[in-house]
Image (spheres, rainbow, N blue to C red):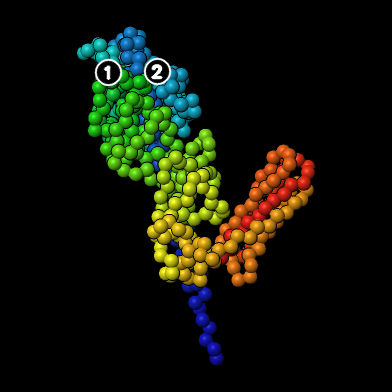
Amino acid sequence: MKKQKHDGGFVAMSVGAGLLIVLVMASLAARYMGDYLKSREWQVVAMQTNRFTQAVSSYVGKFYPTVLASATTTTPAVVTTQMLKNTGLLPASFSETNSYGQQYQAMIVRNQQNQELLQGMVVSRGGHAMPFKALSQISKDITAGFGGYVEDGQTAVGAMRSWRIALSSYGTSTGRGHLAVMLSTDDLSGAREDGDRLYRFQVNGRPDLNKMHTAIDMGGNNLNSVGTVTASNVAGQNGNFGVSLVSNGPITAGGDIRSTGGWIVTRSGKGWMDETHGGGLYMSDNDWLRILNNKGFYTGGEIRGGKIRADGDVSAGGILTLDKINVAGTACPVNGAISRDTAGATLSCQSGIWKNVGDGDIQVVSVTAEAWRFPSATAWCPVGKKVTGGGANCFTPGGSIWLVHSAPAGDNGWVATCDTTKERNASIIVHALCF
């Protein structure tokens, strides 16, 4: 006979206990989240109160004589949010109320002991009363002036009960559950100094104290030991830089740019360019200095180099002078090369040997042709000889004629062509210098 188990009740009790724990934890979490959100809200209220109080201090500092004239020891000059917006001390978007619907006002009165000084009290009005926990927390987070709250509707009490003063001293009152911020004579006198003085040192939370609102005239004196100068425009007679000058844009000079001890250095294939004519010098590889836009290179002086090579024709307006002297019958480097001996006689490199031009190896072959306007002919060297040079003469019975083409035809001939301005027959004589 089987025994019947009786553990179903324990399972139900375990499940019930688990659900109870979950409910307790959920309740605690909800309470914690609610407290956290309230704390964040109170921080925002404190920041809003700070901003309003700072603006009031700036307002009093800026209009100190006006406020002093309108205030007595018992009748305050009232500063509202709209007044601070109208003077630009608060942005137009600044809310007129905090999250409890309370509006801020500042009451400024003369000091009882020294009536040429001002003191003030910022209070919140209307809206909903704040709980004591909120008042206590917000008053401790207020950093502009001395934060506090209104406990009984008649008395302002400082955070942590650090001070206590009757609101009637400032000619005002408000309901309990509202905020209060005391502005001492030192606060407002300091604000007065802020209006006409540029601070030499940084003041935490007050960057406006280190800001100029107009031009500074140094009267010809210097600014020494300056770190970084940030400006939209810099105008001056002279500029001396001990290390370097860096610009992320173009530099325009109305006069010369001189380097007294260094190079004019460019990068990325750039160099010098004449903007008017489009020419200049640059390098686009490690070997060649190039002329920008394939402009010509012109000088009335001398051009020197290890080698001079022309990919096209070479034309000389004067004589061709050969400084190198070689000896006929000795070895030569390249067939077709031209040199001279000590007497000035022309040498030609033939089959690896320097030979005198005119020793029987040279031969001039001439060919004549006639044609309508464009006469052309080719003079061929005899078999076994190579062409080393050539030329042509053009003739016409009327008008002008000129040589338009004159070049080797392979390695044993010379071809040339003429053109004339008249529609008529013209003639050409082509010469080939053969070795």
The picture places residue 99, in percent across and down from the top left corner, at 46, 33
In the picture, the disc for residue 79 is 2
Kind of residue indicated by mark 2: Val
Q: Residue at x 32, y 21 (%)?
A: 216
The picture places residue 245, in percent across and down from the top left corner, at 34, 38
Would residue 422 be seen by someone viewing this image from the given angle?
yes
Q: Residue at x 32, y 14 (%)?
A: 64
In the picture, the disc for residue 6 is none
Kind of residue indicated by mark 1: Gly
**Quadrant (top left/top right/bottom left/bottom right) for the C terminus:** bottom right
SS class of the residue under badge 2? Answer: strand
User: Going by the picture, which residue comes out furthest to the left?
Assistant: 113
**Quadrant (top left/top right/bottom left/bottom right) for the N terminus:** bottom right
Counting residues from the start of the chain, the first of labels 2 and 1 encountered is: 2
Viewer-proximal residue, 378 or 382? 382
Residue bearing mark 1: 219
Would residue 332 be seen by someone viewing this image from the given angle?
no
Viewer-proximal residue, 6 or 32? 32
Occupied quadrant, residue 193: top left
